[in-house]
């Protein structure tokens, strides 16, 4: 089967080919003989019900600093010219991101969009997890400062983070007697009107924040992201270190709790974050970790994903 695959992503020229999961997916598609185009979200347009993307054909190679050759831009009618769209741009999950999901709604499922754009929009990563009682540490989502102070009074040390941030941006730990809470809440208010998340601090984060990858609701494998000494953020983009790790019985239990809902929603490629026994986030926009998983001897998540994509397209 030869598929026509368009990838909606941040500029492909600027990615780190040693860590980027989108690059791994595109290399997998290319190795299977699928045709590739790339475009950035600002190149989408909607006119008289037709969704078009000004995209460039792409040829990839695993050569750092020379990893892509791009052809001349072409105007793709997504409904007619492609079979699959990989929606892989990074957060922030802002109005531009949401608008892009509305555009892609108009071609899915005739064109297989990964992940289902309706469900990407309906499953903000730090809110979706609240649909599954008992999996999170104590968590409050609000813009009510009094509620946040009451939460800290009840739970002591906590983590404060923006509701729609990504990559560990804006995440801070506040001890029970930290005097900076007011100032941090003021800074959040200056940035925008979004609520913030207050979450009970989990000491187990010092041992790592596990990223578990799931394809069509089934766990593929995991890596551990260990924070730098004295840090609370374990994101690889924030100085965290990746390490090999096995899935525990609790990890598999969490996957079994959420997996059927991921499958029902058409969320084919998902990364969940697990600290200790707790699930903290369900990442559905552009989850990472696939390269590190394979590098540590784990499964090839990109191959598993394209096995599933090809199976879906061949059964239609």
Image: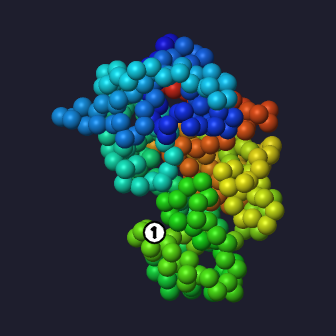
Is the residue marked by circle 1 packed among few (<14), some (14-19), or many (20+) residues within 10 Å?
A: few
Up/down of 56 relative to 266, above or below: above
112 left or right, relative to 269: left
**Looking at the image, can residue 29 be seen?**
no
Q: Residue at x 49, y 79 (%)?
A: 186
Quadrant in which residue 302 is drawn: top right
Up/down of 252 relative to 300, above or below: below
Up/down of 19 relative to 133, above or below: above
Measured as percent of width and height from the top left, residue 132 is found at 55, 59
Tell me the residue that label 1 is attached to: 191
Measured as percent of width and height from the top left, residue 59 is found at 54, 19
Quadrant location of the C terminus in the rendered image: top left
Quadrant in which residue 108 is drawn: top left
Quadrant in which residue 220 is drawn: top right
Q: Nearer the viewer, residue 144 or 155?
A: 144
99 left or right, relative to 313: left
**Looking at the image, can residue 193 be seen?**
yes
Measured as percent of width and height from the top left, residue 272 is found at 62, 50
Q: Residue at x 78, y 59 (%)?
A: 228
Q: Residue at x 63, y 21 (%)?
A: 61
């Amino acid at each position: 089967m030869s598929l026509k695959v368009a990838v909606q992503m941040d500029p492909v020229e600027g990615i780190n080919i040693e860590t980027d999961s989108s690059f791994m997916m595109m290399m997998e598609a290319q190795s299977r003989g699928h045709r590739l185009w790339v475009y950035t979200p600002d190149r989408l347009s909607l006119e008289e019900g037709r969704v078009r993307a000004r995209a460039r054909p792409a040829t990839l190679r695993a050569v750092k600093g020379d990893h892509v050759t791009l052809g001349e831009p072409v105007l793709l009618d997504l409904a007619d010219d492609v079979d699959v769209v990989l929606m892989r741009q990074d957060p922030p999950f802002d109005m531009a991101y949401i608008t892009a999901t509305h555009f892609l709604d108009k071609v899915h499922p005739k064109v297989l969009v990964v992940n289902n754009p309706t469900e990407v929009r309906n499953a903000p990563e730090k809110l979706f997890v609240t649909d599954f009682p008992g999996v999170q540490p104590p968590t409050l989502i609000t813009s009510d400062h009094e509620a946040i102070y009451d939460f800290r009074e009840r739970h002591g040390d906590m983590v404060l983070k923006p509701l729609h941030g990504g990559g560990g941006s804006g995440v801070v730990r506040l001890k029970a007697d930290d005097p900076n809470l007011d100032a941090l809440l003021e800074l959040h208010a200056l940035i925008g009107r979004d609520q913030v998340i207050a979450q009970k601090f989990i000491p187990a984060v010092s041992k790592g924040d596990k990223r578990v990858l799931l394809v069509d609701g089934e766990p593929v494998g995991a890596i551990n992201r260990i924070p730098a000494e004295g840090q609370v953020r374990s994101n690889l983009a924030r100085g965290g270190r990746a390490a090999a790790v096995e899935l525990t019985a609790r990890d598999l239990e969490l996957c079994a709790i959420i997996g059927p809902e991921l499958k029902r929603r058409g969320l084919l490629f998902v990364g969940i974050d697990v600290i200790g026994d707790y699930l903290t986030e369900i990442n559905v926009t552009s989850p990472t970790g696939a390269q590190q998983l394979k590098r540590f001897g784990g499964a090839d998540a990109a191959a598993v994903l394209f096995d599933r994509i090809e199976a879906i397209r061949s059964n239609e």
